[in-house]
């Protein structure tokens, strides 16, 4: 029931987002960030920073 209440508040007032870093990878570097709502716990992995490597935005991959 508590989750339903928080979800309803977020629908009416919008989410209260916080940037969360992904865990450190095997190479010792972070892979980027995502957003998580502090009220309801919803996560958004389509925004935030994402590591750019070979074939990424700067790697000159297939276009």
Image: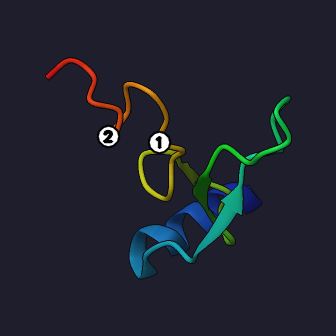
Helix or strand or loop: what does disc 2 sit on? Answer: loop
CB under 8 Å between discs 2 and 1? yes
Q: Which residue is mark 1?
A: 52
- Where does the C terminus fall, quadrant-wise? top left
- The percent position of residue 52, horizontal first and vertical second, equals 47, 42
Element under disc 1: loop
Residue at the farthest top position: 62
Q: Between marks 2 and 1, how big is the CA–CA gap?
A: 6 Å
- Looking at marks 2 and 1 on the same chain, the residue that comes earlier in the sequence is marked by 1
Residue depicted at x 32% and y 40%: 57
Q: Position of residue 14 (x, y in %)?
A: 43, 75
Q: Return the residue at label 2.
A: 57
Hey, which quadrant is residue 11 in on the image?
Answer: bottom left
Residue 53: percent from left, percent from top? 49, 34
User: On screen, 40 above or below 24?
Assistant: below
Few, some or many C-alpha atoms within 10 Å of disc 2 (few <14, some 14-19, many ≥20)? few
Picture quadrant of residue 24: top right
How would you rate the neighbour count of disc 1 (Cα within 10 Å): few for under 14, some for 14-19, many for 20 or more? few
């Amino acid at each position: 029931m508590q989750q339903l209440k928080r979800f309803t508040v977020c629908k009416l007032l919008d989410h209260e987002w916080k940037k969360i870093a992904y865990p450190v990878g095997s190479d010792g570097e972070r892979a980027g960030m995502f957003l998580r709502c502090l009220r309801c716990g919803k996560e958004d992995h389509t925004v935030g920073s994402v590591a750019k490597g070979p074939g990424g935005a700067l790697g000159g991959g297939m276009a």
